[in-house]
């Protein structure tokens, strides 16, 4: 029935053709035009992923949400891998960035990272989806181009700026994967974040009291920072950004 769904379940991946996906005009490959547009299909898939998780996104589920036949979707979306590319680029359009950089590259990079974090919180499937991405859509390219402009004052060459932005995005996605997973684990355990933190603190105090973890004891007795998830993210983000071009 569903070529994409069966491929996903078997672990095989279909190749995505960037030119066919992003440059060719949206049109059905054969037969009559479908009743739905590619934009509608993408929006439906994003809505399913937001509420039920990425694994729930199948061509059958999207068709059911749109009230159409599964096979009609293949006119615009040939497989699930292509649908994933459309979903990633769709939510990349959520970035709210100025038209031009401010000239303060550290501040501008923080703003981009905060936008990425906010988008990943709205779409918690996104961190897990990014490693499977095979191409970059127009919304993603716009963010990338802006980031390269932001980093011009660093003095890094173009290739280094590309790599640096990849590093920054990787940090945000990795951190958000952990942050969101922790929230799900706490919710599943039926405990509050405060209860989990207090229990962990009591355990670590007992562990360091044994005298077996001298360096950990030093770290735990040092003045602690705000453990609010946003504050932790900001501290780590500053360490990443400050290491990009310390002399700039």
Image: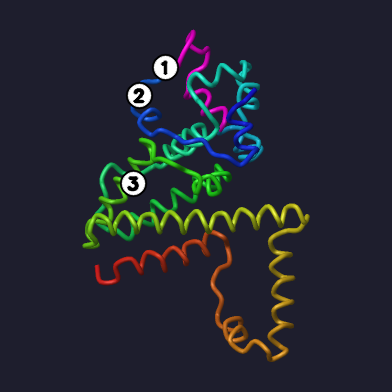
Mark 1 touching mark 2, by CB under 8 A?
Answer: yes
Q: For the residues marked 3 and 1, what is the alpha-carbon distance in whole angstroms?
A: 28 Å
Within 10 Å of disc 3 (Cα), the crowding (few <14, some 14-19, many 20+) is some
Q: Position of residue 26 (x, y in %)?
A: 40, 20
Determine which residue is flagged by label 3: 144
Name the front one of labels 2 and 3: 2
Asked if residue 70 lies left or right of residue 146, the reply is right
- Give the vertical position of 172 relative to 55 (above or below): below
Residue shown at the point (63%, 32%) measured from the top left: 6
Q: For the residues marked 2 and 3, what is the alpha-carbon distance in whole angstroms?
A: 22 Å
First in sequence: mark 2 or mark 3? 2
Magenta segment boundaries in residue numbering: 28-45
Residue shown at the point (31%, 44%) measured from the top left: 98
First in sequence: mark 3 or mark 1? 1
Residue 190, magenta (yes or no): no
Determine which residue is flagged by label 1: 27
Which disc number belongs to residue 24?
2
Residue shown at the point (53%, 64%) measured from the top left: 232
Within 10 Å of disc 2 (Cα), the crowding (few <14, some 14-19, many 20+) is few
- Give the vertical position of 225 relative to 172 (above or below): below
Q: Quadrant of residue 207?
A: bottom right
Exactly how many numbered labels are in the figure?
3
Mark 2 touching mark 3, by CB under 8 A?
Answer: no
Q: For the residues marked 1 and 2, what is the alpha-carbon distance in whole angstroms?
A: 8 Å
Residue 31, magenta (yes or no): yes
Q: Quadrant of residue 50?
A: top right
In the rendered image, which quarter contains the N terminus?
Answer: top right
């Amino acid at each position: 029935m569903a070529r994409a769904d069966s491929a996903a379940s078997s672990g095989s991946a279909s190749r995505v053709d960037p030119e066919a996906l992003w440059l060719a005009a949206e049109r059905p490959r054969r037969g009559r035009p479908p009743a739905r547009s590619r934009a509608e299909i993408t929006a439906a898939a994003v809505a399913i992923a937001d509420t039920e998780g990425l694994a729930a996104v199948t061509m059958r589920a999207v068709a059911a949400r749109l009230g159409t036949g599964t096979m009609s979707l293949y006119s615009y979306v040939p497989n699930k891998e292509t649908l994933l590319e459309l979903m990633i680029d769709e939510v990349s359009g959520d970035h709210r960035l100025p038209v031009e950089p401010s000239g303060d590259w550290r501040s501008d990079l923080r703003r981009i990272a905060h936008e990425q974090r906010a988008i990943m919180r709205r779409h918690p499937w996104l961190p897990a989806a990014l490693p499977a991405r095979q191409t970059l859509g127009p919304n993603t390219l716009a963010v990338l181009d802006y980031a390269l402009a932001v980093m011009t004052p660093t003095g890094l060459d173009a290739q280094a700026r590309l790599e640096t932005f990849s590093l920054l995005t990787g940090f945000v996605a990795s951190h958000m994967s952990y942050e969101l997973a922790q929230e799900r684990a706490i919710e599943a355990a039926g405990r509050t974040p405060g209860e989990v933190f207090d229990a962990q603190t009591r355990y670590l105090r007992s562990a360091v009291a044994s005298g077996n973890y001298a360096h950990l004891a030093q770290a735990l007795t040092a003045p602690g920072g705000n453990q609010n998830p946003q504050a932790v993210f900001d501290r780590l983000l500053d360490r990443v950004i400050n290491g990009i071009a310390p002399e700039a």
